[in-house]
Image (cartoon, rainbow, N blue to C red):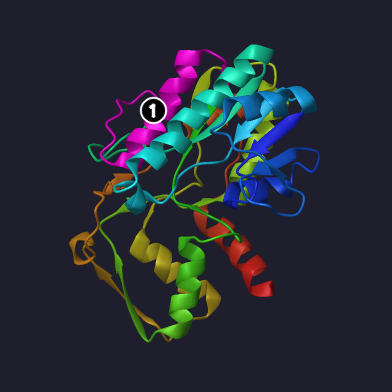
Amino acid sequence: MNVLVTGGCGQLGMSLRRVMADAIFTDVVDAPDTVLLDITDLAAVRSMVASEGVDVIVNCAGYTNVDAAESHADAAELLNAKAVENLAVAMKEVGGLLVHISTDYVFGSKYNTPIPEDAVTAPESVYGQSKWHGEEAIRRVGCRSVIIRTAWLYSEFGKNFVKTMLRLTAEKPSLKVVFDQVGTPTYAGDLAQAIVRLLEIAGQAGNDTYHFTNEGVTSWYDFAKTIAEYAGHTACDIQPCHSDEFPSPVHRPAYSVLDKTKIKETFGLRIPYWTDSLKKCLKNLIAG
């Protein structure tokens, strides 16, 4: 199975490098062990698929700056929808499998219990809409596909909430963090392992949607408190606040917990509790 990973320099792409050493990692940036590929160019995608004999694409690329997407809708749509369509077309033409990473933002804010895969979608942001359009493009093209929706992703790589809180709680005497948004943190290393397991079992199948996060539920405030506690940054006074104290162009869902029953039962996954995975990530970050 020849696997190509897009977004190879992002959080999930870097995490996949640890568990998929034989894959081809691509991105739009020039980096070690990374092949340059512009997935918004269908001809370039087709050429790469043909030259490397690719039969699986794991799409980790995406426009992920939720706030910036509100004023850069065309860029978000290009990368989160049109580029995804290109990948789907390329896999359709060779009978390959596309594994695509999507988001909890496709659901909006009307839920207050864990959200299953077949729940009604209602994205409330440009980012959420563009990601939903990407999912729809895959279904419209009709290639073999697995869509994995995730949320609150963090890792040892790039910019994320965990690394930001590590820095701020070490530098500042006090912080305010919103407590009225709850969800489940997702360690990219665990998602990478799940993708490997999925490919082992579903490499010749496809056409389904799954949810993956770590186990448990927390708020951004409690997430921040736990990061500080585990890192030993207890001198920082972290206080809860409402979302409206931090004006944003995006309305973020107050409840964004994804139901993972389907992926656990289908692939026999035992998903770690979020605090256990956080400890693992912090250990790696602190060790350098």
Q: Percent x, y for residue 74? A: 36, 38
Observer-nearest of 42 and 199: 42
Observer-nearest of 253 and 201: 253
Write down the region rendered in magenta: 118-145
What residue does disc 1 label?
Answer: 133
Q: Percent x, y for residue 75? A: 41, 41
Q: Percent x, y for residue 4? A: 70, 33
Please tell me whether residue 29 belongs to the stretch shown in magenta. no
Q: Secondary structure at mark 1?
A: helix
Point 51% across, 31% down: residue = 83
CA neighbours of label 1 inside 10 A, class few (<14), some (14 to 19), many (20+): some
Q: 230 above or below 66?
A: below
Q: What amino acid does circle 1 point to?
A: His
Number of numbered discs overlaid on the protein picture: 1
Observer-nearest of 41 and 90: 41
Relative placement, left or right, of 190 versus 52 is left
Which quarter of the picture shows residue 245?
Answer: bottom left
Point 28% across, 62% down: residue = 179
